[in-house]
Amino acid sequence: MSDRRSLIPFSPLFPASAEAKMAVFSSLKIVDLPGQPTFGEASDEWLLDFAAAVFGAFDPETNRQLINEYMLLISKKNTKSTLAAGIMLTELACGFRAYYENLILAPTKEVASNSFGPAMGMIAADEELSDLLKPQEHLRLITHREMKSTLKVVAADSNTVAGKKASRVLIDELWLFGEMNGADSMLKEATGGQVSRPEGYTIYLTTQSDKPPAGVFKQKLNYFRDVRDGIIEDRRKLPVLYEYPDEMVAAGDHLKPANFYVTNPNIGRSVTQEWLEEKAAEADHEADGPKAVFYAKHLNVEIGVGLRHDAWAGALYWLGATAVPEVWDGSLKQFLEIVEVACAGVDGGGLDDLLGLTLIGRHRITKQWLTWSHAWAQLDVFERRKDIVSRLEDFIAEGTLTKCETATQDLIELADILERVNDAGLFPDEYAIGLDPAGIAAIVDELVGRGFTEKQMLAITQGFRLSPAVWGSERKLKDGTLIHADQELMNWCVGNAKAEQRGNAVLITKQVAGKAKIDPLIALFNGVMLMSRNPEATAGNVDAWIASYG
């Protein structure tokens, strides 16, 4: 890719199929460009190669599409929606099955219009195509006058895709589906008709997300990356992912304007080098992190931990401080086996908030601090914070978040974990559990009922008084003396944390109030306040306890 070569690694599987459909595709006019050039006249090699790979995977003898899923991850302003219109319009014009359906599924009405508008223009600009295809703008529907087959552009809704029997489905802006609750089921419903239509296929078109990838977008992106990298062998999938190689990102070369072409294969056509450089310069001088959004949307740099300019300083070292197998496998079981003392931090727990727990233990041999976290969410969170439900479901699948079915499930399960640590004799006699002073009564009652003493629990003053823990954590992350369990839940929380300087202190706050949760991270800071006291564990027969737990 950095050599400016096409990412399509092969010629069309069936050249005759590709040639027939490319003749139609190449003649379609792009009406929003000066002079209304055709795809054949205005397109770069990468675009024509992609279209040919789609059309050329159709076996005319068996009427079967050998590659049935494609993902094109490409930067914004690289004619993605126009390409979608061209491919699907070509399939409609060349289709052999009467009364069959083609579908462009978009996350919003605005995105749907981005594809339907160019398709309407292509028909209007071609007399022969106008005689063959009948567009109905108010329905976003195009019908083949002879075959009665259709191309419909719809905005995402479970009701609009229910019962669809589409042969070919194009999913536009997949990253936005990642933010939707139930999007995975919706996409399965939309593509379900391909089971009985072997000529069918699905194309996922998307830019990178302006937030850390989540939900169905994250699942699909990771799968196609594994296919690209040879980790998964799946010959029916074709990943075309315009991303910077890892070595370029590690060296910081993706930030250099000279390398903007890597994820913008249409540079010099639909997007210019000068425009990208101008927007990059503007983003550098804006507040509240638009630089990260610019690089995500226009350069396909995945937003993650530490990419915000106002991120917590420790976030820059977070991903490099993950547990390694020779020290710790990241599990709670091994954590309890290899630490000599532990403290706990607890934060949150409101009905529309997470209850976060972080355990911090001191390794018996290396003396490194190990952190392990878990969170609980009441059902209210899933009702009131629908914008993060897909992320929460990812964490449930990971095993780091529990969805509470009863009002007290989180308190009981949190106390179960703390009791397990206490039974192992790993908690100190005093200052073992650090709690946010707000709303701790129910937690204290549960723990006292389990035999914890008042001396073991300490209310940790929040705000600027947490600064020592914030500074201490970032230093230990950088020097490798604090390692974590490599949990997506915590990666998300750390990425959400925003650092605010207040005089000589620093406050860690939410990036977007009510949306970006950071409770397990604050729990970590609460625990750091206690571990910084250099505690000693209560005497206990740890080996006997380990044996009892197997």
Image (cartoon, rainbow, N blue to C red):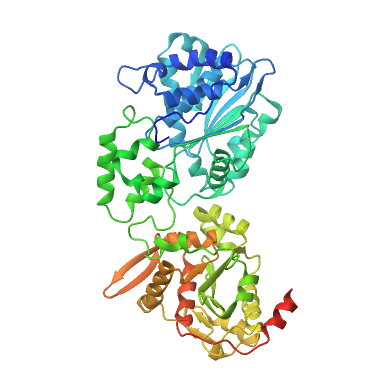
User: Which percent across, then down, holds residue 166?
Assistant: 62, 28
Q: Locate residue 546: give its quadrant.
A: bottom right
Q: Nearer the viewer, residue 276 or 502?
A: 276
- Seen in the picture, residue 260 relative to 517 is either above or below; the reply is above
User: Which percent across, then down, holds residue 311?
Assistant: 37, 61
Q: Locate residue 428: give its quadrant.
A: bottom right
Q: Is residue 209 visible?
A: no
- Seen in the picture, residue 500 relative to 460 is either above or below; the reply is above
Q: Locate residue 298: give its quadrant.
A: top left
| Residue at 44% over, 51% down | 211
Drawn side of residue 257 relative to residue 238, left or right: left
User: Which percent across, then down, holds residue 222?
Assistant: 55, 45
State the quadrant of the C terminus: bottom right
| Residue at 36% over, 56% down | 308
State the quadrant of the N terminus: top left
- Seen in the picture, residue 222 relative to 423 is either above or below; the reply is above
Q: How many marks?
A: 0
- Seen in the picture, residue 80 relative to 444 is either above or below; the reply is above
User: Which percent across, then down, holds residue 323?
Assistant: 54, 64
| Residue at 35% over, 66% down | 499
Q: Is residue 251 visible?
A: yes
Drawn side of residue 343 relative to residue 39, left or right: right
| Residue at 44% over, 41% down | 243
